Image (tube, helix red, strand yellow):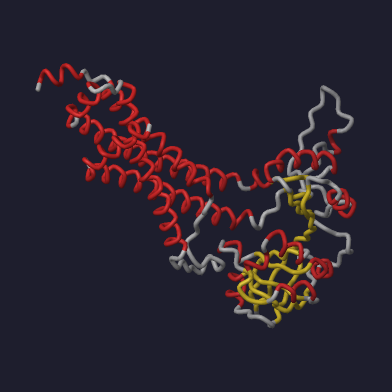
């Protein structure tokens, strides 16, 4: 094997320029594959994070709906038809019954990572003679900071002020801009029942979704309970964070049946984002694979040309005792040397390109937490690139090597 490797290196040096071109082709393919996959998946994580970071894995709530069977339908027989028009929803509050008991049960479930209550209130912000529609979310501030990255989206203010202060509110940036309200200023809020309250602005929130930031606001849950004149056990939602995100759909159905509430899992709520991420991943992998295959064709062409130019050397090798399998091994080694050199250079080039992109400034008002272009440094992209590149190189070298092993030295020498 040492002798065969020495011969392969000699042939490689004899066609050094073509060999370098082939190795550069492999290097370029792997560099672009790693860079493209890292950038596209970093972008996917960024876009999905705008929603998924703010979305519970399972949301428990009570959706208002009409009674499935109306009073007029009771007592009717098969010959009587009841026609009901303008059916109205049931007259009940959108609260969760026994919310405290439900949260206690969920906290004991080993599949659950965190449980946090929420109280949503529809309000109007009074700005002079204008009323702006808004939605105040009463939250457990510390839980939101820990599990939903609430503090990362605050562009002004301290979340601790919201957690400990009374009658404080964090406004969405779009809403704050419309009201020209800054930190420390007081805004007037009117509830659906006509109650008016003054709240002090303790922060500005920006999620990166403009329509969301024009409506959504946050306060600690006790403030919202006081705003609505509700008791301390009054909640409209329970947000559940799981250890395993993939179990959310099945567990949502289980919890809905167990507690007789509506349950929405994160996959169902954000199906369009997952679809977009999957499509972008498919495109990235497809482009990367095509680049590697093109590099394989380059190696195939170079080895084919080398065989035709080195027929004399092949004939001499076989005439001096080298078998066809030895010749095949020589050309396969030659191909794999090109592949390995190109792969190592490509990995270094890919890592360098990822670092360059990761340090390019990317500043936009819509994404206040993003300072540079996103990059995913997952090692699996490097492993996939090297594996597929070496496989392509081996296949590209196999056919020329097989052809070289079938050269008849007698025919070559006789022709000379």
Q: Is residue 27 above or below residue 213?
A: above
- Looking at the image, residue 2 sits to the left or right of residue 267; the answer is left
- Looking at the image, residue 401 sits to the left or right of residue 82; the answer is left
Residue 73: name its quadrant: top right
Q: Residue furthest bottom?
A: 184
Which quarter of the rendered picture does the C terminus lie within?
Answer: top left
> Which residue is at the front of the view, 25 or 373?
25
> Which residue is at the front of the view, 143 or 36?
36
How far from the left and from the top, in percent, is residue 191?
76, 68
Identify which residue is drawn at 78% across, 59% down.
Answer: 118
Q: Is residue 127 above or below residue 208?
A: below
Identify which residue is drawn at 63% across, 53% down.
Answer: 52
Residue 74: name its quadrant: top right
Identify which residue is drawn at 59% across, 56% down.
Answer: 49
- Looking at the image, residue 317 sits to the left or right of residue 168; the answer is left
How far from the left and from the top, in percent, is residue 124?
70, 69
Q: Is residue 272 above or below residue 171?
A: above
Which quarter of the rendered picture does the N terminus lie within?
Answer: top left
How far from the left and from the top, in percent, is residue 37?
46, 48
How far from the left and from the top, in percent, is residue 190?
74, 71
> Which residue is at the front of the view, 14 or 22?
14
- Looking at the image, residue 265 sits to the left or right of residue 22; the answer is right
Q: Residue furthest front?
A: 320
Q: Residue furthest left?
A: 416
Identify which residue is drawn at 75% across, 60% down.
Answer: 120
Q: How many marks?
A: 0
């Amino acid at each position: 094997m040492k002798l065969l490797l020495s011969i392969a290196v000699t042939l490689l040096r004899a066609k050094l320029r073509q060999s370098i071109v082939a190795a550069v082709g492999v290097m370029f393919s792997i560099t672009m594959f790693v860079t493209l996959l890292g950038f596209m998946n970093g972008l996917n994580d960024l876009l999905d994070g705008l929603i998924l970071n703010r979305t519970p894995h399972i949301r428990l709530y009570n959706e208002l709906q009409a009674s499935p069977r109306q009073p007029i339908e009771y007592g009717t027989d098969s010959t009587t038809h009841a026609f009901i028009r303008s059916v109205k929803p049931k007259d009940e509050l959108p609260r969760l019954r026994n919310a405290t008991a439900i949260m206690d049960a969920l906290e004991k479930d080993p599949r659950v990572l965190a449980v946090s209550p929420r109280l949503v209130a529809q309000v109007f912000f009074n700005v002079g003679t204008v009323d702006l529609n808004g939605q105040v979310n009463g939250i457990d501030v510390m839980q939101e900071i820990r599990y939903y990255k609430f503090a990362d989206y605050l562009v002004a203010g301290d979340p601790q002020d919201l957690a400990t202060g009374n009658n404080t509110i964090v406004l969405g940036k779009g809403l704050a801009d419309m009201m020209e309200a800054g930190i420390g200023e007081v805004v007037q809020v009117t509830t659906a029942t006509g109650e008016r309250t003054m709240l002090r602005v303790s922060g500005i929130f920006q999620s990166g979704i403009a329509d969301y930031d024009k409506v959504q606001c946050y306060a600690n849950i006790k403030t919202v309970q006081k705003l609505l004149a509700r008791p301390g056990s009054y909640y409209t939602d329970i947000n559940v964070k799981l250890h395993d995100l993939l179990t959310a759909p099945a567990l949502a159905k289980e919890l809905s049946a167990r507690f007789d509430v509506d349950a929405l899992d994160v996959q169902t709520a954000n199906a369009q984002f997952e679809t977009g991420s999957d499509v972008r991943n498919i495109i990235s992998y497809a482009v990367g694979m095509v680049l590697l295959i093109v590099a394989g064709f380059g190696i195939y062409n170079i080895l084919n040309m080398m065989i035709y130019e080195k027929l004399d050397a092949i004939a001499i090798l076989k005439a001096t005792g080298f078998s066809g399998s030895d010749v095949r091994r020589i050309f396969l080694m030659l191909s794999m040397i090109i592949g390995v050199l190109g792969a190592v250079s490509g990995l270094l080039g890919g890592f360098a390109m990822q670092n360059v992109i990761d340090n390019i400034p990317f500043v936009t008002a819509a994404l206040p937490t993003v300072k540079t272009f996103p990059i995913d440094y997952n090692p699996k992209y490097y492993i996939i690139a090297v594996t597929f590149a070496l496989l392509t190189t081996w296949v590209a070298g196999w056919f020329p090597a097989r052809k070289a092993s079938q050269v008849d030295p007698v025919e070559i020498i006789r022709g000379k």
